[in-house]
Image (spheres, grey):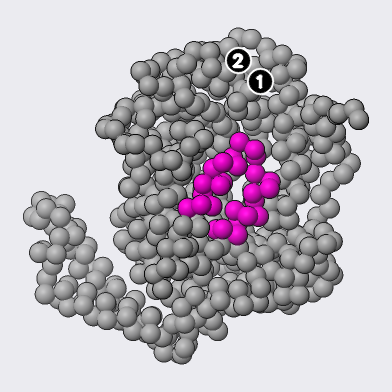
């Protein structure tokens, strides 16, 4: 039998995606402004469901950074009906805790004033607290214990699990917060009730204790990783005025100071139905789902005001910025350029340009790793966000080579793209790979559901059907034009990392991973080591669902993460 070449198959896939066969999405907009997207797919007894709030860290302000991510945690704490033994006592106790916390905040503000004046060295040092301050802390700790006695812990998760649902989780980014789960088709009404109830009647239990949990998450992800603190500094240096400059997890001082009153005000505006989209993908009856949506999501009141778009724009960079750091990592370099937001006409050419550089057959690997032997790994990416964009080049030095040599090699490849026109065959290969990747990502109900939600949180779900054609329309002249437009010295921000000390022997588990993947797995290892059993199981479910649709070059890393999760589960079960 004659074999069909990958090129021909990819072109056929491209035609399938960019042509007449579009993802058949049914859209319903409720009277309160909430949008519901439905894709009926026969055969699977489970339905991938979720909803997205069009709010992320970019919508915050100084003083409440990290609040969007904190809400991701708080939304699992239950409602007036779920998670409590006595709702009246629970609400009364929470109100009293808020009053005590306000007194504590006044005490802390006085210590901060004294620190600013140089009267004390550290506002957090216990030796400077007044007797009243100490009494309030003791009282608040007692009240925290009492609050836990009034709670039914993890009831939200337990209801879903008992009903056969799986993979419940959420995620916060710069531009959105998303919540998702897989439910049996015959439990769709349960999902509609559960999700509408936590939007209509949320009770933010353990609010102040959960701030400490988020603070610990920040410590694990940022402060305890080899380059985390420097990466955060690099981010702030790159963005001069844009709110993308602060971390999604928030600044430590803001996490300490956010109040429940600020959280409730933020929730009322940003978690209102007119700022939400829900999505269902799987084997269900759209007419029945529409009735359920009207019955449950339709009861949510419209927000007090429409959420405002981000006002502060990034200032044009006029001079190159550089940062040098010493960390417990391999010598490496990061080079960033300001570009444009997602959906801009140049975004598609910049994404194609990144693909020309990436992968084992891409220009960076061939040049820096194979030909020059200056780097162990190298990569490029265009990150078009909702309001701004960036293009980043990275490279990890080979032993005996320097980050500066890697930077020079990266710059040389960029100059080639600025001076030479990309060949038609090389360009078409990247387009084919794009088309094949788009096709793979449509096969999983879960992956399709998430894609529709994230797209609708930005430019609209319809872009899932229209963007592939815009990618295929990119020309070699477009690639050359955007390279010259954005990759200029004055628009560049560079971070150089030197090795602070040896990181020790290689971990056998990491065999086969490149340096960037090793760093990512190392960061996740710390977080997994702290995960409770329900979080571990949820993440394992996601890995299993996404495994088949993940790119081939990411399969090894997926296997390592799955092994870490399995080891954590054994550790938890062994401790029982």
Residue 108 within the magenta-colored segment of the rendering: no
Place of residue 62 in the rendered image (x, y in percent of width and height, measured from the top left): 38, 51
Residue at the image position 81 percent from the left and 34 percent from the top = 14
Q: Are marks 1 and 2 in contact (CB under 8 Å)?
A: yes
Q: Residues within 10 Å of mark 1 (few under 14, many from 20)?
A: many
Magenta-colored segment: predominant secondary structure: helix
**Residue 72 in view:** no
The residue where tag 2 is placed is: 417
Question: Which stretch appears magenta?
Answer: 539-564
The residue nearer to you, when weighing 370 against 69, is 370
Residue at the image position 72 percent from the left and 21 percent from the top = 427
Place of residue 176 in the rendered image (x, y in percent of width and height, measured from the top left): 56, 53
- In terms of image quadrants, where is residue 9? top right
**Is 203 displayed left or right of 323 in the figure?**
right
The residue nearer to you, when weighing 575 against 20, is 575
**Is 191 displayed left or right of 472 in the figure?**
left
The N terminus lies in quadrant: top right
Residue 454, placed above or below residue 556 = below
SS for tag 1? helix
Q: Residues within 10 Å of mark 2 (few under 14, many from 20)?
A: many
- In terms of image quadrants, where is residue 169? bottom right
Place of residue 387 in the rendered image (x, y in percent of width and height, measured from the top left): 56, 41
The residue nearer to you, when weighing 400 against 16, is 400
**Is 566 displayed left or right of 544 in the figure?**
left
Place of residue 539 in the rendered image (x, y in percent of width and height, measured from the top left): 55, 58
Residue at the image position 37 percent from the left and 47 percent from the top = 222
Q: Residue furthest top?
A: 419
Q: Which mark is residue 479?
A: 1
Q: Earlier in the sequence, mark 1 or mark 2?
A: 2
Residue 554 within the magenta-colored segment of the rendering: yes
């Amino acid at each position: 039998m004659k074999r069909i070449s990958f090129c021909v198959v990819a072109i056929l896939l491209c035609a399938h995606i960019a042509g007449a066969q579009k993802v058949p999405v049914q859209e319903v907009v409720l009277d309160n402004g909430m949008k519901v997207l439905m894709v009926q797919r026969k055969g699977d007894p489970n339905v991938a469901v979720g909803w997205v709030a069009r709010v992320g860290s970019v919508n915050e302000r100084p003083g409440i950074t990290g609040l969007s991510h904190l809400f991701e945690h708080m939304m699992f704490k239950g409602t007036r009906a779920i998670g409590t033994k006595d709702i009246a006592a629970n609400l009364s106790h929470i109100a009293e805790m808020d009053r005590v916390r306000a007194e504590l905040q006044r005490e802390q503000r006085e210590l901060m004033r004294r620190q600013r004046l140089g009267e004390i060295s550290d506002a957090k040092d216990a030796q400077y607290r007044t007797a009243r301050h100490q009494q309030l802390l003791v009282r608040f700790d007692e009240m925290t214990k009492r609050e836990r006695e009034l709670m039914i812990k993890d009831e939200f998760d337990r209801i879903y699990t008992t009903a056969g649902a799986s993979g419940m989780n959420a995620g916060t980014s710069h531009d959105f917060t998303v919540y998702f789960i897989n439910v049996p088709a015959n439990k769709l009404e349960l999902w509609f009730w559960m999700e509408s109830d936590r939007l209509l009647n949320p009770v933010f239990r353990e609010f102040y204790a959960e701030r400490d949990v988020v603070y610990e998450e920040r410590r694990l992800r940022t402060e305890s990783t080899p380059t985390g603190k420097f990466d955060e500094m690099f981010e702030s240096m790159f963005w001069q005025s844009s709110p993308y400059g602060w971390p999604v997890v928030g600044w430590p001082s803001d996490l300490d100071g956010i109040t429940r009153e600020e959280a409730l005000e933020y929730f009322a505006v940003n978690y209102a139905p007119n700022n939400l989209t829900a999505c269902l993908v799987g084997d269900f009856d759209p007419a029945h789902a529409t009735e359920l949506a009207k019955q449950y999501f339709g009861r949510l009141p419209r927000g007090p005001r429409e959420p405002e778009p981000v006002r502060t724009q990034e200032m044009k960079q006029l001079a190159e910025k550089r940062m040098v750091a010493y960390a417990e990592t391999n010598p490496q370099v990061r080079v960033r350029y300001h570009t444009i937001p997602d959906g801009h006409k140049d975004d598609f050419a910049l994404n194609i340009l990144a693909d020309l550089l990436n992968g084992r057959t891409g220009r960076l690997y061939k040049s820096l790793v194979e030909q020059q032997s200056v780097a162990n790994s190298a990569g490029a990416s265009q990150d078009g966000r909702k309001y701004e964009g960036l293009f980043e080049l990275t490279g990890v030095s080979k032993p005996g080579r320097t980050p500066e040599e890697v930077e020079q090699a990266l710059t040389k490849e960029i100059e080639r793209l600025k001076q030479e026109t990309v060949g038609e065959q090389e360009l078409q290969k990247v387009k084919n790979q794009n088309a094949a990747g788009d096709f793979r990502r449509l096969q999983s109900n879960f992956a399709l559901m998430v894609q529709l939600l994230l797209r609708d949180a930005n430019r609209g779900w319809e872009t899932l059907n229209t963007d592939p054609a815009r990618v295929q329309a990119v020309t070699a002249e477009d690639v050359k034009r955007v390279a010259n437009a954005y990759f200029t010295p004055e628009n560049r921000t560079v971070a150089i990392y030197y090795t602070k000390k040896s990181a020790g022997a290689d971990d056998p588990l990491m065999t086969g991973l490149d340096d960037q993947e090793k760093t990512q797995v190392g960061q996740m290892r710390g977080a997994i080591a702290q995960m409770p059993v329900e979080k571990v199981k949820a993440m394992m479910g996601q890995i299993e669902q996404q495994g088949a649709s993940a790119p081939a070059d990411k399969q090894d890393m997926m296997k390592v993460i799955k092994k870490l999760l399995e080891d954590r589960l054994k550790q938890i079960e062994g401790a029982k």
